Structures are given as C-alpha cells and as structure tokens.
Amino acid sequence: MLIKRAITLSPLALQHVNFTFPNCSTLPLSTLPVCDTSLDFYTRATSLVAQFTTAELINNTVNHAPGVPRLGIPQYQWWTEALHGVARSPGVNFNPDAAGEFGCATSFPQVINLGATFDDALYEAVAAHIANETRAFSNAGRAGLNMYSPLNINAFRDPRWGRGQETVGEDPLHLSRYAVRVVRGLQGPAAQDEANPRLTLAATCKHYLAYDLEASAGVERYQFDALVSNQDLADLHLPQFRACVRDGGATTLMTSYNAVNGVPPSASKYYLETLARDTWGLDKHHNYVTSDCDAVANVYDAHHYAADYVHAAAASLNAGTDLDCGATYRDSLAAALAQNLTDVATIRRAVTRMYGSLVRLGYFDAAEAQPLRQLGWKDVNAPAAQKLAYEAAAASITLLKNRQSTLPLRETAGKTIALIGPYTNATFALRGNYAGPSPLVITPFDAARRTFSDAHIVSANGTSIAGPYDTATASAALATAKSADIIVYAGGIDPTVEGESLDRRDIAWPANQLRLIQELAALGKVLVVVQFGGGQVDGALLKGDDGVGALVWAGYPGQSGALALMDILAGKRAPAGRLPITQYPANYTHALRETTMALRPTATYPGRTYKWYTGTPTFPFGFGLHYTTFRASIAPPATYTIPPPLALHTQNTHPSPTSAYSSPTRAQWPRTTPPCSSHATPTDPRHTRTARSWVTPR
C-alpha cells in the first residue's frame, strides 16, 4: 500500500489569472527606474523590488503572485506549461471554444519521440515554434512567459517510469544536447547576447535532482529518498543539468519532490548554491530557482527534514529556492522572520531574481518596441508549425523488425487493409501527457484512408489497451482481419497506464493485446505491428514470430503523427528513428526494484541503461532499421573529431541519424557498453555526406 501524504497545495496556486502587462506610461510606474530601458536588467529589477514592503515581498514569493497594485504591478502566474506545445496549466487560459481563437495550439510529438530523432536542430526548431505560440497566447492575456516545461531532463533510468515519455531518453549526452538546444529555442537568439540578454521565454531545467519515480514499493515521489552514489550522480544525473545551465544559459532551475541522500534539493545549499550558482553560473544573468509544486511543503510533511512548515520555508529560501510553487512561503515566511530563521534581505534577493527574468522578457517595455509583442492568433498552428509537427513525427518513427522487406507496403491498389487494435481511432492518446487541445488530430484509421487511398480500409478495435481478453470483441476483429490482404495492428500502451503519478508495474505487452496479435499472426497474412506509447514493452515474442512481418515503434507522435506513420508504412517516407531507450526483456524488472538507484551491475544485479546493463536487450539503445542499405566509414582521425561519411544508396527522402560510441581503454569503473559520445544527422540522404560528430573530453 502506498504511503499517502497530505495535499497542501493551495487552491490559489492552481488558479488562472487574466494576464496583463505593466503600463510604464502611467503613474506610479512611469516614475520608477524599472521603466528606464537604458538601465541594465539587474538595476531595473533591483530598484523595483526595493519598493516592496515585507508583506508584498512575501506575497510574491509564490507562483500565483498578486503583484503590487499600488505600484502598478499586475498579478502574475509563474506556472506555464508547454511540454510539446502550449498545454493546459494554471498559466495558460485556452478559449473554452476549441474552434475559436486561442482554443488550441500546435501539438508536436511527445518529447520521447523527439529523442528518437537524435536531431539537435529539430529540438531547437520545435522549441522556437512553441516559444512563438506561447508569446502569442501571452499577448492575448492567455499565458505567462516563465515556463515550467518542456525541459524534463531527468534520465529515463527505469523503464517503468511513467514520465519517461517527457524526456529524450536514458543517455546523459543526449539529454544534455537536447537541453542546450531547447533552451536556445525557447529563450531566443538574443538571450546569448552578453550585453543585452533579452528573452523570448524563460526556460526551466527540471527536475533537479535524480527524479525518476512516481510511485513504487510503498513510496510515492513526495517521500522518496534517492540514494545515489557520487559516481552515479556524476555519470547520469548531473551532466544534463550542468549543460542546461552552463551551456544553454537557462533562466530557471526547478527542484524536485524527492530527496537525494537524505536532503531535499529545495533545501540543499550544495546543489543550489555550490553547484548550480557558483560552479555552473546560474546567477550569470540573475536567474532564479523554483520548487516543483509543493516541493517546499515536502521538506517538512513528506521528508521530515524540517520541524514544521515554517522551518521548511526558511531552509528552502536560505538554500536558494527563490520561488515556491505552492503556498508555504506565503503562509510561513512571516513566522520565519519572527523566529529569526531567515531575513528580509534573503526574501528580497529571491523576488529580485524572479523579477529580473520579467525585465529580461520585456515585461515592462512598450509593446510597439518589441516584435515579439506583435505575435497573435495568426502565428498559432501556422503552416510552418503544421509542417514541422509532421516532419518531427516522421523522423521519430522507428522500425524495429522488417522480415523479408514486409515494409514498405507496395502495390496496395484494390487491396483490403485491416486496421486492428485499440489505437485504431485514437485521438488524445496520440499526444501523450501534458498536451493542450490541438487544432487537429488525425486518427490512424483516417490516416490510412488518406495514405492508401487506392485501397479498401476496414477496422476493428479487437481489444482494449489493458484488461481481460474479450472473446466476442476479438473474434469480430479476427473476422475483419481474415477478409483483408494486409493487417496493421495499432496498439501498445497509452496514458491510462503511464504518466505523471503513474509508473507501470511491468514492461511486457499487455496480455490481452499479445494474445490477439498472436492470433492475427496465425492467419498467414501480411502483418505489421505498431507499438504506441512512451515507454517500451518487450517485443521479444513478436520479434521471433515469423507471422509478424514488421514491428514499428511510434511513441506518441502528436497531431500529425498517424499520417506520418502511414506514409512510412507506404514508403512515401523512410523510417529514420532510433530507440532513445533500451528495450529490455520483460523479466528485467523482476530482478530489481524501481527504488534501487544503483547503475552498475553486480553478481545479482543486472545494471541500468545501455551503459551498464549486462543482459541481452530485446532491442538496444540506438537501434533502428531503414528501408535501404548504407556504408559508413571513419576518416583518418583528427583530435576529438569523428567525421563518418555515409554513402547512402537510396531514393528515400529522409536521412538517418548516426551515433558514435567511445570508451577509455583503461576505465576505472565497470562500464559494460561504450557511452554515446556524439550523434549527427546527414542533411542529404541521396549522396555521400560527412556528418561530423564532436567528442568532448571530460
């Protein structure tokens, strides 16, 4: 039975606000230095917050901030989500009429799909589109500018983790490169200008640190104490946060619910001050730290690291957590001051850091002087965004098996294609978690009718995602399949079995689906199995079944993902995805608890991720087939540079990413597989091109 904690998150923290910008042309704000654009950002923020009373300071340390009406500072909601498109959250106000202006936003593929592309330029392009759409919502008073996503850069350490779908996978280099490029896309090119580092949006690196569990072995994420060796922290959990802050220049860091070796990160001066600020440079542009929502309260009520909420608030503030997503600061900091547990200067420092980001965002500047303030509804789900959503989905879809060139499906004119499985008419499930209303979602059935317009498309669900095998429903699906020439099974897992607060118990195909697939395979037809879902399920039985011609992983491909999938099955596009996580055999999770954080194998412990797993995976990290053959050769070595020219013999129009793996010849610790050193994607697949990868020594 899970240990439940009291929910203390204030209803106020969840409330939406009607966003407005401060008006620097009217009193009293117009007389304050914060409106003087000739001053540096820090001076403007400092001069403003110096005007706040102690009560006003405390009231503005929480995510639902009332502002300071007497100074002309409006209320603000710091909690805005846009994991793979502008998403429902306290900081986003969608039009209730989904067909009206600002009733939807582009729904790009889930982050795990982006991870399968191994395409750094794509990450930045998607982030830039998300930034522009968020800005358009903001200009309409419908969104904040300080993002709580899309930078979930925790490693997908355990295959059962429900939020692994929000990450690009299990490799820290991959996570690091994703972090840097997404920060750049969100914050915009001006953010890198040392003299005038203006922001498009403020990007948040989360969840710091070692957060990769929702609920397991009698513990929830709120109470979980991740016991991690310094070596494992350095190898898997810290590199991507260092890259996000130091190399990407992220504005914000979010602390996680869990403790790390007994200390909640929200209350850790070492993680927040020594590492993030002093070593990585988080304070370079006066940036701030936010807690995850209720993580400050967790310092007391879940971890019992503090004696009460007052001590928890003081410990977190003093450690460097500036913004409390919740109500603990608002309710407890006055008492903390009275007990001399903290001081007004520390509170003022925190609020100044937060308002420093708003100054960098142009929050106080005239709209007519800012091109970003001109964005509107016409810039949401624009044709370029629709095209990018499709391209990203196509680049992510991964071919795992292709027996006797089952794919692509050729000469389908006049044939009957049966689409079977619980994803046949899926809509919302195609997007994964943290999705807002999208302008369109093409179901697999509709996509099949578009792509295979010369074929007859029939369908039947046959079974549900999970649950008992219903003989009558399955028999109807089998009858439909028998009448077809080609069968495409669309199933796997969906947000009902994985997500936030929801880890899986096992990683096998749901038994009801597996039975139906095996019965379909026994029909002797052409059978293509498509697995949807963010986490992997063990496809060993399908891999070894000659009745299954092809096996494809599609993840959560977003609003145009089903069309991209069908185009790949038809050969209009070539598959180019690579698994960003290891597909383990189903019994892998029998050998270890999700709560065990150790990475390295022992005689009785199999190890974690592709670097340390000692068993044989069903499909390894980085695996993915193509419709063509190619040759790869490595040119004469140059210092720290690996240039592999790829001679691709194909008429397909999508490039295939390449990865380089390297390891020291005298490793000082057990490492079973060389780590990924770099990856690159050739820009033109029809000719030999040099895809240059950079290897950084550490």
Image: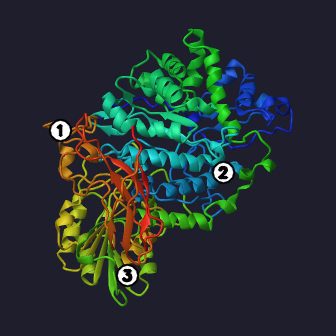
Image side of residue 161 versus residue 293, left or right: left
Instruction: Measure the alpha-carbon separation of dots 3 and 1.
Output: 48 Å
| Residue nearer the viewer, 578 or 386 | 578
Q: Which mark is residue 605?
A: 1
Query: Residue reaching furthest bottom?
Result: 414
Asked whether disc 3 touches disc 1, contact meaning CB atoms under 8 Å apart, the reply is no
Secondary structure beneath disc 3?
strand
Inter-mark Cα distance, 2 to 3: 41 Å
- Mark 2 or mark 1: whose residue is earlier in sequence: 2
Quadrant in the rendering for residue 45:
top right
Q: In the image, what residue type sits under mark 1?
A: Tyr
Within 10 angstroms of label 2, few (less than 14), some, or many (20 or more) residues? many
Q: Callout 3 environment at 10 Å: few (<14), some (14 to 19), or many (20+)? A: many
Which residue position holds label 2?
Answer: 135
Nearest to N terminus: mark 3 or mark 1: 3
Q: Which amino acid is tagged 3?
A: Ile
Q: Quadrant of the N terminus?
A: top left
- In the rendered structure, the answer to whether residue 504 lies left or right of residue 444 reads left
The secondary element bearing badge 1 is classed as loop
Q: Is residue 692 visible?
A: yes
Q: Mark 2: which amino acid?
A: Arg
Circle 3 sits on which residue? 457
